[in-house]
Image (tube, rainbow, N blue to C red):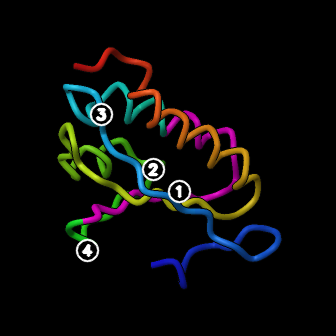
Amino acid sequence: MADTAEKTENGQVLECEVVVGNKMGLHSRPAAMIARMLSEFKGEATLVKCNSPGECADCRSVLSMLILAAGKGTRLMLRVSGDGAEVLFEKLSGFFFRNFDEESE
């Protein structure tokens, strides 16, 4: 996947593992917020299920993210590349680490 991803200005793909920590999982509100974050950037972002590498989602598509069925505790690989990747990576990874700005059990 990373070898076909658009590269950042210096040719790298930024990635980290994130865990869905809120009790409702990756549902429509956080998926829409993620897609909205991408609308401000030209870069690309994908989510890949760590235990099922064939399952990936384009973060510009709410439906694509919902199809992952990422419930609480799901481990995902966040991959970001392209123009503005560093800023986008910080925004997206922070959003996951803050449990989508929702309460967590």
Q: Which sits earlier in the primary sequence, circle 1 or circle 2?
A: 1
Residue 21: mark in rendering: 3
Residue that badge 1 annotates = 45
Q: Amino acid at mark 3?
A: Gly
**Where is residue 98 drawn, in percent x and y?**
46, 27
Residue 59: mark in rendering: 2
Contact (CB < 8 A) between labels 4 and 2?
no
Contact (CB < 8 A) between labels 1 and 4?
no
Q: Amino acid at mark 1?
A: Ala
**Where is residue 71 drawn, in percent x and y?**
18, 40
Q: Nearer the viewer, mark 1 or mark 3?
A: 3
Contact (CB < 8 A) between labels 3 and 4?
no
Residue at the (39%, 57%) spot, across then down = 47
Q: CA distance from mark 3 to mark 4?
A: 22 Å
Contact (CB < 8 A) between labels 1 and 2?
yes
Residue 40 in the magenta stretch? The answer is yes
Crowding at label 3, few (<14), some or many (≥20) Cα neighbours within 10 Å?
many
Residue 103 shown left or right of residue 7 in the figure? left
Residue 54: mark in rendering: 4
Q: CA distance from mark 4 to mark 2?
A: 16 Å
Q: Amino acid at mark 2?
A: Cys
